[in-house]
Amino acid sequence: MTSKQKNSGVRPASGRLGILTPGLGAVATTFMAGVESIRRGRSKPIGSLTQMATIRLGKRTDNRSPLIKDFIPLASLDDIVFGAWDPIPDDALTAARKAGVLDERDLAPIAEFLQGITPMPAVFDNHYVTRINGANVKKGKNKRELAEALRKDIRDFKSKHGLDRLVVVWCASTEIYLKPGPQHATIAAFEQAMESNDDQIAPSMLYAWAALMEGVPFCNGAPNLCVDIPALVELANEKGVPISGKDFKTGQTWLKTVIAPGIKARMLGLKGWYSTNILGNRDGEVLDDPASFKTKEESKLSVLHTILQPDKYPDLYKDFSHVVRINYYPPRGDNKEGWDNIDIVGWMNYPMQIKVNFLCRDSILAAPIVLDLALFSDFAHRAGMKGIQEWLSFYYKSPMAAAGLQPEHDLFIQQTKLKNTLRHLMGEEQITHLGLEYYA
Ligand SMILES: NC(=O)c1ccc[n+]([C@@H]2O[C@H](COP(=O)([O-])OP(=O)(O)OC[C@H]3O[C@@H](n4cnc5c(N)ncnc54)[C@H](O)[C@@H]3O)[C@@H](O)[C@H]2O)c1
């Protein structure tokens, strides 16, 4: 019996899977172009756990470490169909060329495929993303009507392409900072606020509502609230649909969640962490608006406190200073540069410094995350999971957590949780690394 057969509770990944992205910009087009290149054997799925990672099963001596994709029933890349919404009417080829992430030598062979992906009219409002203007926008008498139009898009896309299942991944611009309020507290309040065009209901929330109403899992790659409000968590649970967010964990924050657990594991102290970035893509331009930057800043700042727990370790982490800057600098395009200066303290309070200079490519790091989130969310849905998927925290800067719980930020705890969830869902023993065999 293979591992896949062990658990019959997970529905098989039969038929085609639609992946819809609000936003057809740098991240979404890099993701779609990458999947198509992989399907044609022109590229390898580097950075994707669903495609490349293995998972250990049983005891170390058992020597069972299949690829994750051979262990759990995941949709095959060949069965994926892409769609998107964007206020800018460019097809995926034009959008990819404008984003400037991928070279022409990688775009040219798949040009026709990318040209075939044209964005549906978006639910878009300049109030929430001030630096973008586009004409490919839906009209409606209120937000409820706009959200209903998104539901229709989802249904039409499904029937047009003969799809079995769908997933929606928010890859659109970061919206302005909003705080959860009474409009977001219950499904009834939320729906009432859509009817009355309340300005606390952002477009991203309408996409999330529409997806959940259609029974479609929803992932949020940006830091704006979106699906992270009680009303939509309640709706996800009611409809039996997995949700996750917020903000893809790429670049600087990913490294932060690698380095900070290392400092803490050795009980070294932290005096300060200064992070600065320059980037010149459209995301950088949107984040140049202070209201959108505030959303991003909140997301980036939360990470260190939850990992280091200053209240538990006041001698090491009380009052450390944490500064995050993002500067829009057009010459760099999507090739961001991040600097981190980390002031740590060791034995007898002697200071030390760590400097990190990361020349990363934002969308190259984000694309495999979009793929994994879509495939894992679809898998979770077929496994009967619903509501917040904390095991997908691995992919997010501001992971969603159940009310009253602190999100987990440590990349290695997140990885353990992810793999143990897969083991559990497939009826395998969870791995605790306890080595109990020594005590038998
Ligand atoms: N690249 C990364 O490493 C990374 C990491 C974390 C989060 N993110 C987030 O992912 C998102 C996408 O990043 P990007 O670099 O592709 O940005 P981008 O500016 O290239 O693309 C965003 C696209 O979203 C569209 N858009 C804006 N509002 C929309 C709406 N209401 N409906 C549909 N489309 C809408 C824009 O027109 C644009 O084409 C951003 O929010 C960014 O903050 C990216």
Image (tube, rainbow, N blue to C red):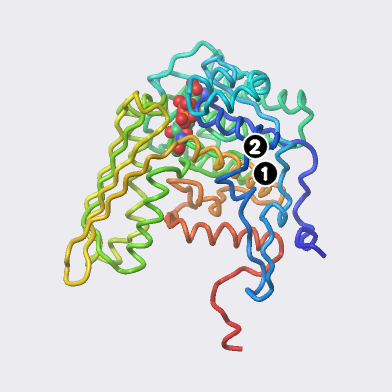
Placement of 312 over or under 355, stated as above or below: below
User: Residue 167 bears which disc, if any?
Assistant: 2
The three-letter amino acid code for the residue at tag 1 is: Asp
Q: Which of these two is toward me, 160 or 106?
A: 106
Furthest-top residue in this view: 135
Placement of 403 over or under 334, stated as above or below: below
Question: If the image is split into quadrants, where does the N terminus sit?
Answer: bottom right
The mark tally for this picture is: 2
**Disc 1 target residue:** 378
Helix, strand or loop under label 2: strand
For marks 2 and 1, the one nearer the N-term is 2
| Label 1 CB less than 8 angstroms from ligand 1 | no
Dot 2 and dot 1 residues touching (CB under 8 Å): yes
Does the rendering let one see residue 228? yes
Helix, strand or loop under label 1: helix
Which residue is at a point 79% across and 29% down the rendered structure image? 162
User: Residue 288 bears which disc, if any?
Assistant: none
**Which percent across, then down, holds residue 83?**
64, 26
Does the rendering let one see residue 140? no
For label 1, the crowd category at 10 Å Cα-Cα, with few meaning under 14, some 14 to 19 and many 20 or more, is: many
**Which percent across, then down, holds residue 430?**
62, 68
